[in-house]
Amino acid sequence: MTAKIKGLKCRECGSEYKAEAFHVCEFCFGPLEVDYDYEAIGTRLSRESIQAGPFSLWRYVDLLPVEGIPTVGNSVGMTPLVHAKNLGRKLGLNHLYIKNDTVNHPTLSFKDRVVSVAISRAVEFGFKTVACASTGNLANSVSAHAAEAGLGCYVFIPSDLEAGKILGNLIYNPTVLAVNGNYDDVNRLCSEIASEYPWAFVNINVRPYYAEGSKTLAYETAEQLGWQAPDHVVVPMASGSLYTKIKKGLNEFTKLGIIDAKPTRMHGAQATGCSPIAAAFAEGRDFVHPVKPDTIAKSLAIGNPADGYYALKTAAESDGRMGHVSDPEIVEGIKLLAECEGIFAETAGGVTIGTLKKLAATGTFHKDDVVVAYITGNGLKTQEAVRDHVGAPVQISASLSGFEEKFKLEDKGKRLSIQA
């Protein structure tokens, strides 16, 4: 074991374990997470050492739970941080940024980050087969990275997933199992299978390592902002893990002196049809009531979020807010981001932008605050959500006269007006 990893530690009772494929405390059944030796890490980590690293998430390898050379993920991460001037102008924000994981490699979502870490660690443990329970993006990424690593692969998905995400699994030739039920049903089944088969379930028995990959979004944001934390972030929430890990990443950079301390306010976004964390926040509860998902944002449709309690705690500690948006508002958010910034997000991105818009309207931000909204997946995967809400091509014949029948020229050709 390298000096940077002490082992695993329970987030509830603090019990310590060896760094193995294990995710639940034997004493209190609390979740386990990786325990790092930050003193040892601090002796070698600096802005300069990070910038000298590869142009991928592995430039932050000192803060990720792998011991040797990573098996996969050499092209994952370092996605654009876009200064969203047009959208910012509409919302009254001078320094709005979009962290754009719609272009992440290879499967166009942030899940490539967590899977790169999980599979690299699974290979170190000696696993020959990887698996997952997924709402779509995770399954795509596990399938792709398993193919790259030469591992066997089983992915379990709800049977009603979007066609693009199903195809995004099958192309890599894993075994795809479509379960008659929602994600929570799929996850329960996979937990049972994980106890019987010697497979690395990336979001079950390898979850403590898998979850750490999300921190790289925070690291990249801080580096791309010129080594500073933002004033606010808006993060989509399913299990709540991404939301908490972005905060953890900012805290680690602060602890190690990579960035100066700043009280970043953490804002969470959910779909109204599956908003157990946002509902708990609105009602002042520190616990989550499970719900049955009913939303077009299938990638966020986790009715019993594993990290809901910790997400609520993160919001309270950071003076954050949580909001939710309806399915029509999700579509509106997707279109708004596309029309303003040329970024086509999946439904989870519509949730983020819809919530960002509501937060801006209620005065959560000052106009000169640095605000970062996280867009986690590509809109080509969820085309069904917007297909009936966009325009249609203008049909014309293949001739100049056919064109002019449809359009008239105004202001000496500078403008075109369509004929009814």
Image (spheres, rainbow, N blue to C red):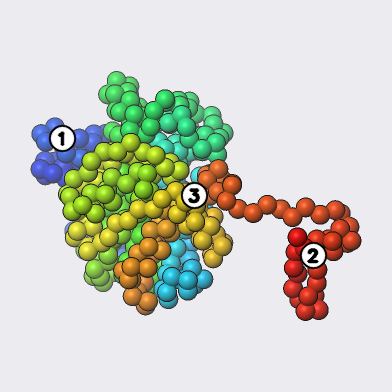
Labels 2, 1: front one = 2
Quarter of the rendering containing residue 68: top left
Q: Label 1, label 3: how many angstroms apart (C-alpha)?
A: 35 Å
Residue 368 location (% of width, % of height) = 37, 77
The answer to whether 143 appears left or right of 265 in the picture is: right
Asked whether the beta carbons under mark 2 and mark 1 sit within 8 Å of each other, the answer is no
Q: Secondary structure at mark 2?
A: strand
Q: Earlier in the sequence, mark 1 or mark 3?
A: 1
Query: Which amino acid does the dot numbered 3 rest on?
Result: Glu
Of 281 and 67, nearer the camera is 281
Residue at the (51%, 37%) spot, across then down: 162
- Residue underneath mark 1: 29
The answer to whether 3 appears left or right of 243 in the picture is: left
Q: Label 2, label 1: how many angstroms apart (C-alpha)?
A: 68 Å
Residue 10 location (% of width, % of height) = 16, 42
Of 303 and 167, nearer the camera is 303
Residue 294 location (% of width, % of height) = 39, 39
Q: Label 3, label 2: how many angstroms apart (C-alpha)?
A: 33 Å
Of 162 and 34, nearer the camera is 162
- Residue underneath mark 2: 407
Residue at the (89%, 61%) spot, across then down: 401
Q: Earlier in the sequence, mark 3 or mark 2?
A: 3
Residue at the (38%, 32%) spot, across then down: 182
Q: Is residue 41 above or below residue 127?
A: below
Query: Which amino acid does the dot numbered 1 rest on?
Result: Phe
Q: Earlier in the sequence, mark 2 or mark 1?
A: 1
- Residue underneath mark 3: 346
- One can see residue 120 in this view: no
Q: Is residue 272 above or below residue 415?
A: above
Q: Secondary structure at mark 1?
A: loop
